[in-house]
Image: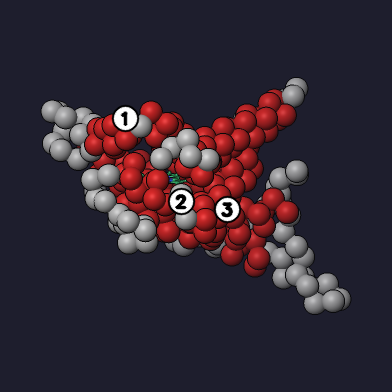
């Protein structure tokens, strides 16, 4: 699939700030960062880095989830360990809260940049065809936009379900194994997860390749194909790894 490399019109730059007490070098750096943030390539870079941070989290989360196949002792023990990583250097669940803060900042930055780039994209294509339709974004771009929205909704559902327990059929605060098993005994909860997980896969499949290009890994002698394959393999491993859990419960392997 071809990537859209048309240059987007940038917002007009505001007047440069005057040099503060720290001197012109610092003000130049701040101005450079501001310019980068306002540019489309800067926003794409933020999306690439934050996307890769979230993919790393998903890979670790998926691997951790597979402990469910070793029984409640292993799975619940792993969930409890997550709350004490870093002890005794860090206190209690500090590490978990730092991780949550990093993920939240990454998610907010990713979504903000995506929304701003979409707005720019639409504003840069005001030409309408005779039948009244706007010039259409590429299939990949539209899939990323709608997939991203569905993913966001899935994440809200997932946190209400397994972290807050609000939508879980029989939530036990200290029993993640039990919470997961009761979840996947309900057919429509399985449907929500399967749709959400397929969206995760689609998003990573295109997003990984797109991120590596933004970060400067330009195609050279089959490198583009290698990056596409890497993205697809990563997407398949993460999606299938996550899907193994509902499938395990549905087939009675996990009970
Ligand atoms: C079958 C698929 C999945 C299962 C069984 C699962 C399981 C769980 C469980 C049990 C927890 C709660 C851990 C605890 O509080 O002890 C959790 C938390 C979480 N999951 Fe998932 N998960 C799945 C897929 C996903 C996906 C696809 C995403 C991201 C799109 C995701 C993101 C999160 C996040 C952000 C948390 C909160 C971590 C925290 O702050 O404690 N999960 N998951």
**In screen coordinates, is 251 left or right of 156?**
right
Indicate which disc residue 185 carries: 2
Figure quadrant, ligand 1: top left
* Mark 1 sits near ligand 1, with its Cβ under 8 Å away: no
Looking at the image, is mark 3 or mark 2 earlier in the sequence?
A: 2
Mark 2 nearby-residue class (10 Å; few <14, some 14–19, many ≥20): some
Image spot of residue 73 (x, y percent): 28, 31
**Residue wearing tag 3:** 195
Quadrant of the drawing holding the C terminus: top left
**Residue 55 coordinates in the image, percent (x, y):** 48, 38
What kind of element bears circle 3?
helix
Residue at the spot 51% in from the left edge and 44% down from the top edge: 250
Mark number for residue 74?
1
Q: Which of 167 and 214 is in front in this view?
A: 167
**Residue at horizontal 43%, vertical 37%?**
254
Q: Is residue 126 above or below residue 167?
A: below
Query: Dot 3: few (<14), some (14–19), or many (≥20) neighbours within 10 Å?
Result: some
Q: What element carries label 1?
A: helix
Which residue is found at the position 62% from the left and 46% from the top? 202
Task: Work out how far the residue at label 3 is from the one at label 2, CA to CA, in angstroms.
Answer: 16 Å
- Image coordinates for residue 75, horizontal then vertical, percent: 33, 34
What is the quadrant of residue 131 in the picture?
A: bottom right
The residue at the point 56 percent across, 36 percent down is: 240
Q: Looking at the rendering, which quadrant does residue 82 occupy?
A: top left
Q: Is 68 left, or right, of 141 in this rendering?
A: left
């Amino acid at each position: 699939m071809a990537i859209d490399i048309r240059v987007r019109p940038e917002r007009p730059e505001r007047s440069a700030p005057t040099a503060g007490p720290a001197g012109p070098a610092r003000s130049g750096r701040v101005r450079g960062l501001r310019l980068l943030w306002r540019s489309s390539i800067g926003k794409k870079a933020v999306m690439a880095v934050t996307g890769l941070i979230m993919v790393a989290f998903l890979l670790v989360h998926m691997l951790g989830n597979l402990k469910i196949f070793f029984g409640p002792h292993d799975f619940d023990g792993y969930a409890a360990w997550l709350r004490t990583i870093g002890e005794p250097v860090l206190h209690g669940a500090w590490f978990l809260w730092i991780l949550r803060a990093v993920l939240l900042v990454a998610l907010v930055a990713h979504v903000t940049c995506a929304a701003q780039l979409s707005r720019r994209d639409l504003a840069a294509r005001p030409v309408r065809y005779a039948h009244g339709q706007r010039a259409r974004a590429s299939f990949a771009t539209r899939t990323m936009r709608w997939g991203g929205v569905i993913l966001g909704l899935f994440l809200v559902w997932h946190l209400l379900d397994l972290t807050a327990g609000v939508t879980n059929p029989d939530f036990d605060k200290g029993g993640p194994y039990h919470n997961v098993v009761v979840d996947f005994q309900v057919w429509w909860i399985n449907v929500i997860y399967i749709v959400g997980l397929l969206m995760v896969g689609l998003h990573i499949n295109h997003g990984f390749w797109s991120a590596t290009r933004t970060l400067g890994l330009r195609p050279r002698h089959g490198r583009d194909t290698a990056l596409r394959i890497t993205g697809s393999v990563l997407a398949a491993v993460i999606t299938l790894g996550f899907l193994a859990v509902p499938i395990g419960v549905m087939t009675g392997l996990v009970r």
